[in-house]
Every structure is written in structure tokens, then in C-alpha cells.
Image (spheres, rainbow, N blue to C red):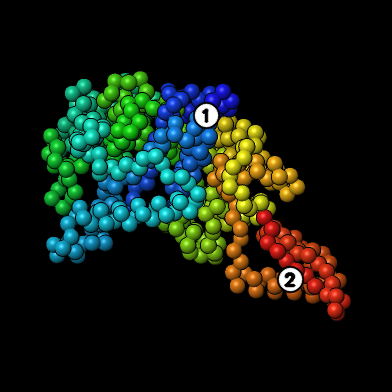
Amino acid sequence: MADRPALTLYNTLTRSKAPFAPIDAENVRMYVCGPTVYDFAHIGNARPVIVFDVLYRLLRHIYGEAQVTYVRNITDVDDKINARALRDFGKDIDAGTVTLNEAIRRVTEKTANQFHADVAALGTLPPTHEPRATEFVQKRQDGRADMITLIERLIARGHAYQAGGEVLFDTSWGEYGELSKRNLDEQQAGARVAVDSHKKNPGDFVLWKLSSPEEPGWDSPWGRGRPGWHIECSAMSAAYLGETFDIHGGGLDLIFPHHENEIAQSRCAHGTKVMANVWMHNGFVQVEGRKMSKSEGNFVTIHDLLATETFGGRKWPGEVLRLAMLMTHYREPIDFSVKRLEEAERLLAKWPTGGNGEGPVDPAVLAALADDLNTVAAVQALHALAQRAANDPSAAASFHASAALLGVMPKKTEISEALEADIESTIQRRLDLLKAKSFAEADRIRDDLLSRGIQLKDGKDPATGERVTTWEVKR
């Protein structure tokens, strides 16, 4: 495409922003770390899903839908999953009616299905491929990369060793730490691995660990066991995107150890100079100004927000949650709050509905997104376009195409009977204030309703001459 916008992206690997140049413009390839499906996804998990969905949409717009391959994995082998399976199906396992592997599959099927429903409600497109870790442990009939083969290759090349019933990666490899900028002395043991005497270096991390009879396991050259956490993404990215690809994404918390270890494994196994050319990481999410945790009482799942009234005393539409996320630049920390959601909802209420997403994308919106996914500027440009759309059909068409690119197509508001009764009651209270000549308070009510997308129209009853007020939902 001769008119492709100049896309620039911030690369965590170089700590700088640079023009994006894909390895092959006919096959732009992106991998993003997906959920560990032991429980429902929380609002922090939603952020990378939304951020990289916008990037996926942008890449498809620039290079063509068929020219972009997006892989997001599902981690379905994990000690937390094992514990959840034992908790939920322990009696069945003891009775012999269900095996541990069957219990694990039931847990992961339920939570994976919920994840898919939740992120669909957030307006995200499905990735091109969504591999499960358990499907890439052993050698595959289709010849795609797998974990055991990668581990065998690392051992053969002197980058891994067997000790203490484990296979470990040797982090004394000279280029280990290039992503996180840590040296060997600063390295800590990889996630899920304790510092043990059988390790050559404290930071050496597990590639394979033996399983007890009560734990899930696969046959391997090193005994019945299961893979460490990090090796799965090296296998699945290589399986679908090749030994080197364009973009690898995830949350800021994954830089070390997970992404650092992915790079080490992949480069050493394949003998390549890079695993991915661009590494992108979204910032952390706080909830109401505090770090989200169950102990703080502010742990919120996507399902909680969509389907329950546990946050702010009400349910929140998916498009509101999405816009609230996009109102902060992806690399910045975000404070997820009721106030933020209300702000996003008021903004959506002012935007026109309808349209099929066809039309030219607004140059200002596209330029903002092409500048390292500056969704803040893109939303501002989209709002300016919405203000012109009421009286300009071409602006309306451009608005809908631009909103579709961001994935924030506003929907018509459904008015429940309870909400309708509340609006009528509020209007009556305003009429009483007008009769009492409390004009400032009456105006405040009118403006508050308008911010919620409810526009009032004052008039007189032709039969009685009394003041009447009608209302309609405006977008």
C-alpha cells in the first residue's frame, strides 16, 4: 500500500520509539501472552487484551486483514490450575470417577470459555491462532515446534542441564538480561522456582520438572514431568510465527522473568540474533488508587464488571470498560475507578450511533494511533469528529470508520423500566424547582441528565398552558 501511514512503536528492548518495519509486509506477525485459565480474568488482564486488539486492528488497516497473524496463547498447565482442580473435584478424583487430567480440563474449559465471553464483550477480535500450552508439550504430528524438542536442543547446545530432577536453563549465557537490563548478579530465581543448591546460578530457571503420581505429567527423555512456565511461549510462538517475528506483547510485569527467559530460550535454541524485533508492554492497573489484590478487597474480574453490581453498585457495558482503558496511553499506569467509567460513559453518550464502520478513517485518528498507539489523542480526535457528525454526513461516515478502528462503536442506550421511572421522577423534581424559581438547581439537573445522554425539551401543554418537559436519549 503506497499510502501506508508511518507507524512508530516504542520498543522495550531498545528503550526507544522507532519506525516499524515488518520482516515481511505480506505476513506481519505478533504474539501476545494470554491468560492462565485457573480463574476468571481480572481487570488487569483486560488491559493487554484491549491494547493489543487495537494494535491488531491498526496493523490490519495498514497492511490488510489477510496479511496479519496474531497469536495469543492460553496457559492451561500450571500449579494453580492443579490446585483448583483438586479443590473443585477432589472428591471425584478420590472416588475414581474423574482423573486429575480430566479435572484439570474441566477447570480450564470453564475458565477459558468465560474468558472468551468476557473479552468478546469488550469488543475484541479473536486472534488468528489461540494455542493451548498442553497441546505443545510433546512432539507434534504436524511438525510444529514443541517444548520437549526445544529443551532437547538447548541441552545439546550447552545452554541447559539436568540436575535435581529438573532440566534448567543456564543463565550464564552472555546476553541474558538484555530486555530487563539486569546483569547476572541482579537476577532472581524465575517465577515458580526456588533457589536450590543443584543450580549452577541462582537465576537458572526450570525448563522441565518431574511430576509426582498426583500431578499431571507427560513422558519425556528426563522422566514423566511437566514443563516450566516460560518454555511454552517459546514453543507456541515458533510454531505459528517462526523463529523470529515482528512484535511480542504483554504486561509490564512480564518483562522479568517471563519475557527475559523467553528470549534466552528461543535465541539459544534457534541460534538467532533476536526472538522478536519489537517488544511492547502495557502499564500496570490500579483499582480506585490502590494495587488490586483480594486482601485489599478491590479485586475485580471482567465478569464482575459486566454482569454484577459489585463495582459502583451497577453493571457496566463492555464498550464503556474498553473506552475507559483507552483514555490512558497504554504505557502509562491507569487508575481504574467508578469515576473513570462514568467519564467514559458520558463521552460515549455524546457520540452518534448507527453506521456500519465503512468510510474513510479520520487522518487525525489514524495519525494518533500510528504514533505508538496514542489512544488518548485518538479518542480526542474521535470526539471532535463526533461533534461535526450531526450536521456533516461525511464526518459521520468518517466517525463510524474511525470508531470501528478503535473498537469503540457506541450502542443505542436501552432504557429499563426502573431507569425510565427514575428519569421521570427527576424531571418532576426539576419542574417543581422551576415553579419555585430555583433556576440554578433546575439547570444543574438538566445538565446532569444531558451528561448521561438524556436531553430535555421544555414546552407548554396546549390544552392547559402548563409547563411540560419531554426527553429523549441522545448519542
Q: Residue at x 60, y 34 (%)?
A: 366
Closer to us: 300 or 468: 468
Closer to us: 233 or 63: 63
Quick check: can you spot residue 124?
A: yes
Assign a secondary structure to mark 2. Answer: helix
Residue lying at the far bottom of the rendered structure: 464
Q: Residue at x 16, y 31 (%)?
A: 162
Relative side of 459 to 236, left or right? right
Q: Which residue is mark 2?
A: 427
Q: How many marks?
A: 2
Q: Amino acid at mark 2?
A: Ile
Relative side of 154 to 69, left or right? left
Q: Residue at x 72, y 60 (%)?
A: 450
Closer to us: 237 or 442: 237
- Quarter of the figure with residue 165: top left
Q: Which mark is residue 9?
A: 1
Residue 89 position in % (x across, y down): 23, 62
Q: Quadrant of the N terminus?
A: top right
Residue 326 position in % (x across, y down): 56, 44
Label 2 neighbour load within 10 Å: few <14, some 14-19, many 20+: many
Label 1 neighbour load within 10 Å: few <14, some 14-19, many 20+: many
Of pointers 2 and 1, the one earlier in the residue sequence:
1
Q: Quadrant of the C terminus?
A: bottom right
Q: Which mark is residue 22?
A: none
Assign a secondary structure to mark 1. Answer: strand
Separation (CA) of disc 2 from disc 1? 49 Å
Q: Amino acid at mark 1?
A: Leu
Residue 109 position in % (x across, y down): 30, 54
